[in-house]
Amino acid sequence: MARDLLRSNGYQVIRSAGSRSPVDLIAWREHDYPIFLQIKRTRIQLTHAGKVAQTYRDDLDAFRKIICPHKASRHLWIWEDRHGWRFFHVLQGGICEVSDVV
């Protein structure tokens, strides 16, 4: 679903071959910087960014260690069953929820 959402918004998308990689997708479009994405799915609603950061702490730590090109961004996308997508920028010191990233 994430790949299709990105493609429908004009992005080229590469999917990581291994599901154990900290990076699930890499997306870019002309004149934009690349986005490195980690995709999660949950059946529970995570009420705030702090709960998301706590729930996925180890995954986010591994994700932050990935060396990205200059000005590339790291995103965490979470599909919450019955609620839909939530989007987060992954920063060195935490995460920040954003309303839309495409």
Image (spheres, rainbow, N blue to C red):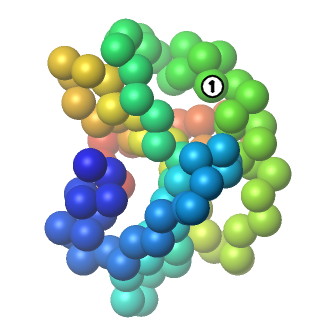
Splitting the image into 4 quarters, where does residue 13 fall? bottom left
Nearer to me, 49 or 62 = 62
Provide the residue designation for mark 1.
Answer: 56
Relative height, residue 89 to residue 49 (above, below) = below
Splitting the image into 4 quarters, where does residue 93 fall? top right
Residue 17 placed where, x, y %? 57, 61
Which quadrant of the rendered structure holds the C terminus? bottom left
Nearer to me, 24 or 28 = 24
> Is residue 59 visible in the rendered structure shown here?
yes
Side of 79 relative to 16 (left or right): left
> Is residue 50 visible in the rendered structure shown here?
no
Question: Which residue lies at the image location 53% right of the left edge and 54% below the top edge?
Answer: 24
Kindly give the residue lying farthest to the front in the view shown: 18
Relative height, residue 76 to residue 28 (above, below) = above
Relative height, residue 37 to residue 55 (above, below) = below
Tell me which amino acid carries mark 1. Tyr
Side of 86 relative to 69 (left or right): left
Q: Label 1 neighbourhood size at 10 Å, few (<14), some (14-19), many (20+)?
A: few
Question: Which residue lies at the image location 47% right of the left edge and 43% below the top edge?
Answer: 39
Question: Which residue lies at the image location 26% right of the left edge and 49% below the top edge?
Answer: 1
Q: How many marks?
A: 1
Secondary element at tag 1:
loop
Residue 26 placed where, x, y %? 51, 67
Side of 60 relative to 48 (left or right): right
Question: Which residue lies at the image location 66% right of the left edge and 44% below the top edge?
Answer: 20
Residue 45 placed where, x, y %? 35, 12
Relative height, residue 70 to residue 24 (above, below) = below
Residue 85 placed where, x, y %? 29, 35
